Amino acid sequence: MVICITEDRTKEEIAVKLLLLSLARHCPDTPIVLTYPPASPQFARWVAATIPGCTLRTARVSGSSGWNIKADALLGLLAEGHDEVWWLDSDIIVTGNFIERYRDIPPATLVVCEEALYGAYRDDGARTRGWGFPVARSLPYSLNTGVMRVSTLHLDLLKRWKVLLEDERYRAAQKDFWHRRPIHLMGDQDVLSALLGAEPFAETPMYVLQRGRDILQYFGFSAYTTRERLANLRHGPPAFIHCQGWKPWTSLAPERRASDIKTRLQNLYIELSPYSFAAESYRNQLDAPLPWLEHLSPMARLFRLLGFHHAALTGLPIAMLIDLVRAVKGSGRRPAGERA
Ligand SMILES: [Mn+2]
């Protein structure tokens, strides 16, 4: 078994480091292969000195980039002889030993995530139909590929996924703005959702990491609902926090601190992120300070104080307010996805 991380943007380096530190703390026995072509000698030295189980590679996985690289990267590691591979997006941080927690899931079962509420959430077969396949399994929501576990029993699925990610229709849609793309061509995960709803992959058993219970899909203003927070207070935090969409390391850069109310609210929401709470405990192991934690706004400090510096309590009043607005709006676009 191996953990696979692939990144090619230097602006995401801080996130890669935080993910590696969280893995070294919580899953020290599982080897990691990190592919990071722009690695500087300083970064390579830091990895060698700090993350003993990590192999750093600087050769590109393939011609693909961004999220389209996932199929290639997973197929590559399976071809090297690993029987199971966990994919983690570089914007994930782990808060526990997930290898241990999910060890009983059989190798034939594909592990993948439930999409964030704020994303293009609903599916009901839409992506499968979009590709022109008959719907054999209707998924209520889109799958999210921030965390995946595949095994050698998923080679056919991964190869088919790769073929569709190289399809001309998909490639053409990727050049357009994301909000103008048809739902089945938005990103890699929409293609995977389409395939898993169609034959023969509708038979592939899946374990879907559920939003709130298994993974925090911290994206947009519905990132961490009241229900998810209360469940986390009772049962403990999920093993994965996915810092989707708004990234503190870029959004909260001092030059981006805008003054309009919407941006300020958005920045506050990012400052109160459970990702930041998890990141905080690695401050001393980094070779540079985390800028967004050094300069928290007075409002963020106040909310942290009121939330007893607990990730699930901090920002709870804001979450309740947002949930109330969503409930009042009734059958808005996203709330329909919230489970009872
Ligand atoms: Mn991600």
Image: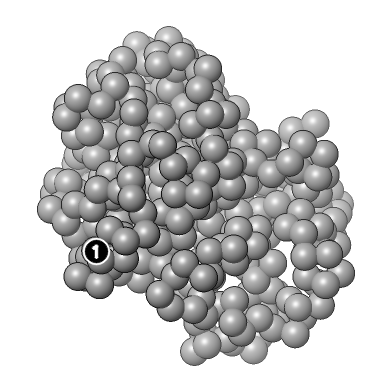
Question: Which x, y percent locates residue 334?
Answer: 67, 46
To which residue does mark 1 refer? 44
Side (left or right) of 179 relative to 41: right
**Which amino acid type is shown beneath numbered disc 1?**
Ala
Determine whether 183 is above or below 314 in the image.
above
Q: Viewer-proximal residue, 304 or 49? A: 49
Question: Which x, y percent locates residue 129?
Answer: 42, 26
**What residue sits 39% from the left and 36% below the top?**
30
Side (left or right) of 81 relative to 10: left
Query: Is residue 330 among what the camera can see?
Result: no
**What residue sits 83% from the left and 64% below the top?**
307
Question: Which x, y percent locates residue 177?
Answer: 37, 60
Side (left or right) of 185 relative to 256: left
Image-quadrant location for residue 306: bottom right
Determine whether 103 is above or below 317 in the image.
above
Query: Is residue 44 among what the camera can see?
Result: yes
Determine whether 283 is above or below 133 in the image.
below
**What residue sits 59% from the left and 82% below the top?**
294
**What residue sits 59% from the left and 47% below the top?**
95
Image-quadrant location for residue 236: top right
Determine whether 84 is above or below 257 in the image.
above
Q: Quadrant of the N terminus?
A: top left
> The residue tagged with tag 1: helix, strand or loop?
helix
Cβ(mark 1) to ligand 1 < 8 Å?
A: no
Side (left or right) of 157 relative to 166: right
Question: Which x, y percent locates residue 55?
Answer: 25, 48
Q: Viewer-proximal residue, 162 or 53? A: 53
Q: Viewer-proximal residue, 106 or 145? A: 106
Q: Quadrant of the C terminus?
A: top right
Query: What crowding class fits label 1: few (fewer than 14 Cα within 10 Å), some (14-19), or many (20 or more)?
Result: some
The colour style of the image is one colour
